[in-house]
Amino acid sequence: MPRCLIRFGCLHMAHGVITRVSNWAPPSNLNLLCFLSFAVVVKCCLLTGNMARLPQLVPDQILKLKQLTVLTLAESNKVLPYDQLMQELDVTNVRELEDFLINECMYSGIVRGKLDQLRRCFEVQFAAGRDLRPGQLGNMLHTLSDWLTTSDNLLVSIQEKIKWADTMSEADKKHQKDVEDRVEEVKKTLSLKVS
């Protein structure tokens, strides 16, 4: 059964939640919520020193961040080079990377794909969705609008093809009836000549 990837962005965007958390929780917890909502890579956090602004992460949180990193990378690239993944996930060897992708990502259902050891890449076939980051809503609306337009055009095209098929079917039936009528006429004519 896949692990639940909670949509942290919903919590982050809810003003009441942010106000309550900021009133009683240390700033590092609010930073963690923001980080879980939109963070891309664990190593980036470690390298930029943002770790000091976060509470100590437990292994499950680090695992979740690594899974979210794979999802984020997979949303923009369908072929993920091993070298990039190893760097982003702070993994030291290919075996560890492949074990992580298989056991923690593919078996949990957050991604599907093929591990290509010859080309040293992960070919993504499916990736679960992530929260929209600030600024992505406009692009998502544009994409959905384009999809709707394409769907409408496809529907019109299908309806035209159905109409054409119905017309051709009627024409074929009419032709079939004409041929049968003509055969009957010829039979009658021949039977009159024989008698």
Image (cartoon, grey):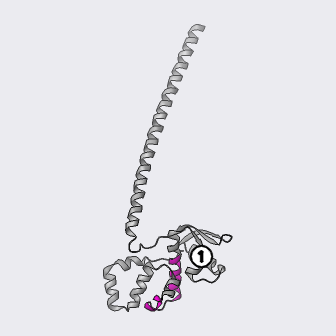
Say which residue appears at 43% left-offset and 90% top-offset. Answer: 53
Residue 142, picture quadrant: bottom left
Q: Quadrant where the C terminus lies? A: top right
Predominant secondary structure in magenta?
helix
Is residue 92 left or right of 40 when viewed as pictured? right
| 150 is higher (above) or lower (below) than 163 | below
Residue type of the residue flagged with mark 1: Leu
10 Å crowding of disc 1: few (<14), some (14-19), many (20+) = many
Is 1 in front, or is 6?
6
Residue 30, picture quadrant: bottom left
Q: What residue does disc 1 label? A: 101
Is 194 in front, or is 152?
152
| 17 is higher (above) or lower (below) than 125 | below
Is 78 in front, or is 161?
78
Q: Quadrant where the N terminus lies? A: bottom right
Say which residue appears at 58% left-offset and 76% top-offset. Answer: 84
Q: Position of residue 193 (x, y in %)?
A: 58, 8
Q: Is residue 90 magenta?
A: no
| 154 is higher (above) or lower (below) than 129 | above
Residue 17, picture quadrant: bottom left
Segment colored magenta: 49-69
